[in-house]
Amino acid sequence: MSRVSLIIVGSQPSIAVSLMALSRHENIQVIACLQAVAEVFIKLTDTDPCIVLIDFSLINETSYSMLADLRRSHPNVRVIFLCDRPDQAKLLDAFRHGASGYIETKDREAFLAKAIQAVSDGEAWVPRQFVTKLVERLTRS
């Protein structure tokens, strides 16, 4: 398994819990902890992370365009969102703008490291329930 570099974006409590969930995984290196999505672009000038983990509560309409800009300017960087109660429509918007995965906060301890590794390897990471709802939505269209 290759070493994955990571930037975490979120509130202090969210960052702390994520760091604790990742502390025993030697193949994941947290290179920065930020409190605003806009700070990611500044940090990317001095580092080259594989994954940016963003607390979804920080996302607004402006963030979607920043996410699209991030994908254009740094195509190798992948974004995973951490969500408390995912809003399906907002998550679909996030994926349309370049997100590679999301994980629910309640599953962070069990799956965060796996999600990071999977997305780093080029896979998407979404809970099965989301896939089911997505397929239902697509078949109704």
Image (spheres, rainbow, N blue to C red):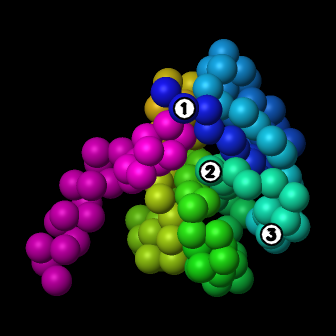
- Seen from this angle, which residue lies furthest top? 24
Whether residue 94 sits left or right of residue 77 in the image: it is left
Please state the horizontal and vertical placement of residue 41, each as a whole percent of the image: 80, 69
Spatial CA span between label 2 and label 1: 13 Å
Q: Earlier in the sequence, mark 2 or mark 1?
A: 1
Whether residue 127 sits left or right of residue 85 in the image: it is left
Q: Who's the residue at 62% across and 50% down the image? A: 51
Q: Who's the residue at 68% across and 41% down the image? A: 5
Q: Against 1, is 90 above or below?
A: below
Residue tagged by mark 2?
Answer: 51
| Quarter where residue 128 is shown | top left
Q: Amino acid at mark 2?
A: Ile
Spatial CA span between label 3 and label 1: 24 Å
Image disc number at residue 41: 3
State the SS at label 1.
Answer: loop
Is 140 colored magenta in this rendering?
yes
Residue tagged by mark 1?
Answer: 2
State the residue in front, 28 or 79: 28
Image disc number at residue 20: none
Q: Against 61, is 138 above or below?
A: above
Residue 108 visible? The answer is no
Is 105 colored magenta in this rendering?
no
Q: Earlier in the sequence, mark 3 or mark 1?
A: 1
> Label 1: how many residues lie within 10 Å, few (<14), some (14-19) or many (20+)?
few
State the residue in front, 12 or 34: 34
Which stretch is magenta? 116-141
Q: Who's the residue at 22% across and 55% down the image? A: 132
State the SS at label 3.
Answer: helix
